[in-house]
Amino acid sequence: MHTVVETDVLIVGSGPAGASAALALSTYGVRNMVVTRYASLADTPRAHITNQRTMEVLRDLGVEQDVIARATPQHLMGNTTFCTSLAGEELGRVRSWGNDPLVQAAHELASPTRMCDMPQHLMEPVLVNAAIARGTDFRFSTVYKSFVQDDSGVTVTVEDRLRGDEYSIRARYLIGADGGRSQVAEDAGLPMGGQMGVAGSINIVFDADLGRYTAHRPSTLYWVLAPGATVGGIGAGLVRCVRPWNEWLIVWGYDVTAGAPDLTEEYALSVVRQLVGDDEIPVTIKSSSAWTVNEMYAETYSAGRVFCAGDAVHRHPPSNGLGSNTSVQDSYNLAWKLKLVLGGEASPRLLDTYTAERAPIGRQIVTRANKSIAETAPIFEALDGLSPQTPEQLWANIAARKDATEAAAKQRAALREAIAFKVYEFNAHGVDLNQRYTSAAIVPDGTPDPGSARDPELHHQPSSRPGAKLPHAWITSGTRTLSTLDTVGRGRFTLLTGIGGEAWLRAAEAQPLDIATVVVGPGQEYEDPYGDWAALSGISDGGALLVRPDGYVAFRHADATADAEPLLTDALRRILGHG
Ligand code: FDA
């Protein structure tokens, strides 16, 4: 018998994109189901850098503390080291992931959260467990095969790998979160730009106690410049810490035109030995797999009732640590829109803003990640290590930097400069936090884009201009200190105002939509003892910000006005796609 199962949102895939879509939808009370190909969640570490924006999303979804409890903390992430092997010579370091004192201050000012290192095989269970606990219907060993859609929904054929048969799932909407080889994106005909298979790479997961080479310069990433390290791959050899200091993942390139090498245990061990540089340390190889560096992004993230998120629509190397972060943020952008459309509070037109808002981000991060690979080359150039070489030549060039000659001084300066430039990969705070949206779900307030006072890739620039994420400021409520971000989210719109903003409060109450209200000021529910909010809010006390469930400012009015109700009503009509 061909069974038909029903749900409101069917999600294909349980990676960061699918799991966070399920978690957000279940948190918002939307009926959803996940089907995923394998009998288990990710069994290798994969993506790991978890940036402040993702931590803010996880904070709103109520799992921030679960992630912190399992993750490697920020202070153990940030001495990105360049060396000839772990046991060999060190060539230099970049203070990374917010561990530069100045950048650390910027991180503390930008967000109530801290970034951390949360390997994907630890992250997925946190997201999936919470999603299931809140109502997600989760089906392992279930493979998406095809879909057909009509005016009222999508019918998806799946294969149950345990029973070996197929059945249908009828959903109002389908989310393809099925990763870099997305069948859903292909079946939906999403147009892709860029190129797959730009370079070849191998991941080797292994156990070894490497504390003697790493604990004194704690880091997530140790980059190895050695003969062969510029072939394919992600710029150089990489020894990545999975758990300090005895679980590791090596990334090593191969010539994609020649095909992946035979991934025997002997081969994996030889790569580990070369990059670690100490043959005495016991090593247990856990797994090896080959993958390709991709540079591809979709121009459109949806077709009718089918939406794609994560690697399904942006495929790029791990540089800058943007993979799972962007995937989680895609789903967070989509989930509240689906909730409002399914609940009849918004027009389906609201869903068009998903592509308008997320596709430019996808294109930007694919480009950034691939650029970061290219920016490793100057380090080799400083060592003259890109020219046709023998290993002896490369070692001689590396040794030559110690000479007391003018040429060696020049080489040392070039090396310092090239390593310092990697800040664009390892400390790009602006790339993480400066995402701005332009779409029909953002009502411009007529103010010009102030541009960026500093390099927008490196520095976060808070703004309350519509299309920006609500700025973080520490405020108080009685004895409690909380972030302005803690006053918004949880699937609701929030209106923030201050003393003199009563007309905005009445306007919010008059709307058919459930809108939370926040008043900040002396004697109000929230106070601003440091004056931080006054400096960042971008409105006068009687003005208002309307913040979407995903923490983005959708509407701003700088001052008190008697026209609050028609202004807010009109803004919501536009945001929700009713006008
Ligand atoms: P993701 O690939 O995580 O998940 C896709 C999901 O869809 C999986 O659950 C899969 O089983 C399921 N699926 C696929 N087809 C299906 C079908 N037909 N039916 C049902 N289910 C289906 N990034 C990084 O920053 N650093 C790193 O070191 C690595 N390393 C790495 C190694 C390997 C082996 C991979 C595959 C990927 C990485 N990545 C990485 C990339 C990183 O993992 C990636 O950016 C995110 O996981 C993207 O999350 P998604 O949820 O979009 O896809």
Image (cartoon, rainbow, N blue to C red):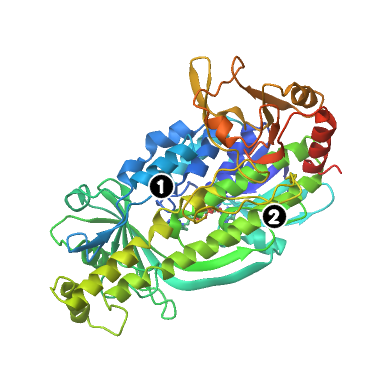
Circle nearer the N terminus (2, 1):
1
Q: Which residue sits at x=74%, y=27%?
A: 514
Q: Position of residue 306 (x, y in %)?
A: 72, 53
Query: Label 2 to label 1, Cα distance in Å?
Result: 28 Å
**Residue type marked 2:** Thr
Left/right of residue 403 with respect to residue 524 in the rendered view? left
**On the image, which quarter does residue 542 sit in?**
top right
Q: Which residue sits at x=26%, y=48%?
A: 218
The relative height of residue 554 versus residue 199 in the rendered view (above or below) is above
**Residue type marked 1:** Pro
Q: Position of residue 576 (x, y in %)?
A: 79, 41
Mark 1: is the Cβ under 8 angstroms from ligand 1? no
| The furthest residue to the bottom | 388
Left/right of residue 278 with respect to residue 181 in the rendered view? left
Question: Which residue is denoted by mark 2 in the rendering?
Answer: 355
Q: Of the numbered discs in the image, which one, if any, rests on residue 119?
A: 1
**Residue toward you, 302 or 451:** 451
**On the image, which quarter does residue 396 sit in?**
bottom left
**Residue toward you, 151 or 148:** 151
Q: Which residue sits at x=46%, y=36%?
A: 113
**Residue toward you, 407 or 223:** 407
Left/right of residue 451 with respect to residue 446 in the rendered view? left
Q: Are marks 2 and 1 in contact (CB under 8 Å)?
A: no
Instruction: Rate crowding at label 1 as few (under 14), some (14 to 19) or many (20 or more) other CA atoms within 10 Å.
Output: many
Q: Position of residue 492 (x, y in %)?
A: 68, 31
Instruction: Rate crowding at label 2 as few (under 14), some (14 to 19) or many (20 or more) other CA atoms within 10 Å.
Output: many
Regarding residue 504, the answer to whether it shows in the image is yes
- Give the SS element for disc 1: loop
Q: Of the numbered discs in the image, which one, if any, rests on residue 179?
A: none
